[in-house]
Amino acid sequence: MAADGAGAAPFIQIEGVSKFFGTFPAVRDVSLSIDKGECFALLGASGCGKTTLLRMLAGFEEPTSGSIRIDGQDMTRIPPWERPVHMMFQSYALFPHMSVEKNVGYGLKHEKMTRAQRRDRVAEMLDLVQMSGLGSRKPHQISGGQRQRVALARALARQPKVLLLDEPLAALDKKLREHTQFELMAIQARTGVNFIVVTHDQEEAMTLADRLAVMDKGQVRQVGRPLDVYENPNSRYVAGFLGTVSQFEGRVIRAEGGTVTLSVADFACEISVASPLDTRPGEVLTLALRPEKLRLTRERPEGPNTFPGTVKDLAYFGKDSLYRVILPSGGLISAHAVNARRGAQAPDWDEALWVSFEPGAAILLRD
Amino acid sequence: MRALTGLSQWFDRRGWRDLIIGLPYVWLLVLFLLPFLIVLAMSLATRTPTAPPFGYGGDNPLLNFEGYARLFTDDLYIRSFLTSLMNAGVATLFCLALGYPMALGLTRISAGWRGILLMLVILPFWTSFLLRVYAWMGLMGRNSWFNGLLTDLWNWVTPEAWALGHIPMMQTNFAVVLVMVYTYLPFMILPLYANLERLDRALDEAAMDLGSRPFRVFVDVTLPQSVPGIIAGGLLVFIPAAGELVIPTLVGDAGMPMIGRVISDEFASARDWPMASSVAVVLLILMVGPTILYSRFNARAEGSGPLEAQK
């Protein structure tokens, strides 16, 4: 995907949008640019303003200030029924008194189409979501996963420029989620419609989205490709929200050539981290370590960033295990180990180990 | 002692459940079915000059269908049935027309206002029903400010040839319908409100999102889903209105009595209890019809109600 604002105006442009409910700022000065065909995710904990932002895109809420442009048109004051934007609701909001076909065809009533064209379009949509043959059922006669497909077909039937998805996978069970996730991506690729997904589930956001925005307290904290945001979070909040991290405070000893050396009270050694941050000696920074980037070994490995610890807790998930290692200082650090070999003797409770990581594996954070 | 323990064990096991389920049935049996059977028996008796003024046997046939026969031959009964159905029907329609927007409004305002307005809907019940009917009689009388105001309005909008000194409102079916609408409006509003309040607002938004303007949303989404509420409110207004006695007696046209008035007159003035009972039985059968239809509809709607569909 192209970077923000490269030459042509972005397809969806949100500029300085704020929304106050009374005196409560639900969304504060959010600006985002989304390119055509992109699948964009708004990610955040509940109450972070992501749903309010989505509702402003749909037209259900009017921004207190700022503007929203879609495909060059100012949408800020356009009512929902005139927007080329359709929404897949979290509850699916299927009309209970209408059949699946009627639901899917509902929006087409407002299009200049013949009855036959309308019927064809409904059939085509049901085919797209693999619901052909169930058109005459009522919503309460189909399963939750099928309802979601109908909701998707209904929202896509009028060929919107933008499809808004509010927690699209939240109501599905785990098996169905994975399947639906890939299906959504395939449908997005096939239709080329811009998807904007609101979710509190970081995995969902990372797999679905080309780019995502992490929101907190009504503000956008970081925007970028899932990979960039995950590997290079710009704040402790983002690092903690996207995946798990263990965070430690460290004091900068020296910085040279992109490598910062810190003393971390919790580790009994000096730590070298590759970081683009411009640091001063003596400055206190946060060292964030992702569990999968740590190595646990019985023998002391060669190299920097090696310190001892004892297994306090372990959770066996089958394909991998999560260890909680207690450090000499009493601090805890989480480490992931993939159970790659059958019958291998994995570290056990209360076992003394060495923890180590590459200089490039840790993240230094100032905020 | 052992018997008592056994009894208490049985009671613990299923006694409470049976008791709770059984009570309403006992209630219906004693206070509805039994009296109805008495009325039914009375309707088949023969009028006598004794006290109580009916009897069986002797010179009289054990089953006397004369009352029912008269129902279909004497056009007083047919006309009063029709008057009742018409008055009740018109009152129900007006209650719906007035009550629906009010019920819908109640679901759309802030919780604080909702409490106040709901209380205002119920508030008239706190004063005597008779007192309220008398108040309307005062308002509709020929010398009241209300009648004067309406008369002026009438004279202003209509040609001079139609000018009136006052509008004859009292002793008309108009007065009956007006007071019935006033009296029964809460019975329309409350079930409608209960129905509309549990509708999922996301459905409205979905319809809007798919291109429908608010009125279209109402027609496509809100109205079809409120049919059970409309039927419930309609029955709650129509059934008592059709059998209404006090309102037509006080403000109605004595020349066009409603069926409640006829029953009352047969019982009290004519002392023809078998005849009055026959009318009452037929009225009940007429009213049970729509109720059964309603519960049929309800049972069917249960399966596809808005709550069910969201599960």
Image: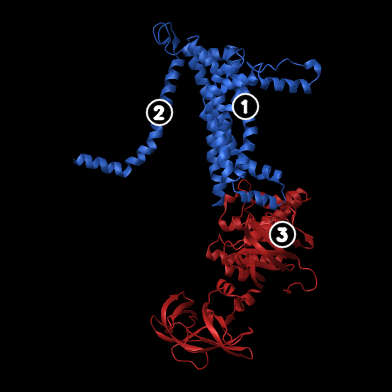
The residue beneath circle 3 is A65
Give the image location of residue B226, x and y in percent: 60, 40
Give the numbered dot on residue B29.
2
Separation of residues labelled 1 and 2 (CA atoms)? 31 Å
Which chain identifier belongs to the red chain?
Answer: A
Q: Outermost residue toward the left? A: B1
Please, what secondary structure does the residue beneath circle 3 have? Answer: strand
Viewer-side label of 1, 2: 1
Q: Quadrant of residue B145?
A: top right
Q: How many marks?
A: 3
Which residue: 66% across, 51% down?
B205
What color is chain B drawn in? blue
Please, what secondary structure does the residue beneath circle 1 have? Answer: helix
Please, what secondary structure does the residue beneath circle 2 have? Answer: helix
Q: Amino acid at mark 2?
A: Leu
- Above or below, A293 against B133 in this view is below
Comparing A321 with A350, the one in front is: A350
Q: Amino acid at mark 3?
A: Ser
Q: Quadrant of residue B79?
A: top right
The residue beneath circle 1 is B91
Give the numbered dot on residue A157.
none
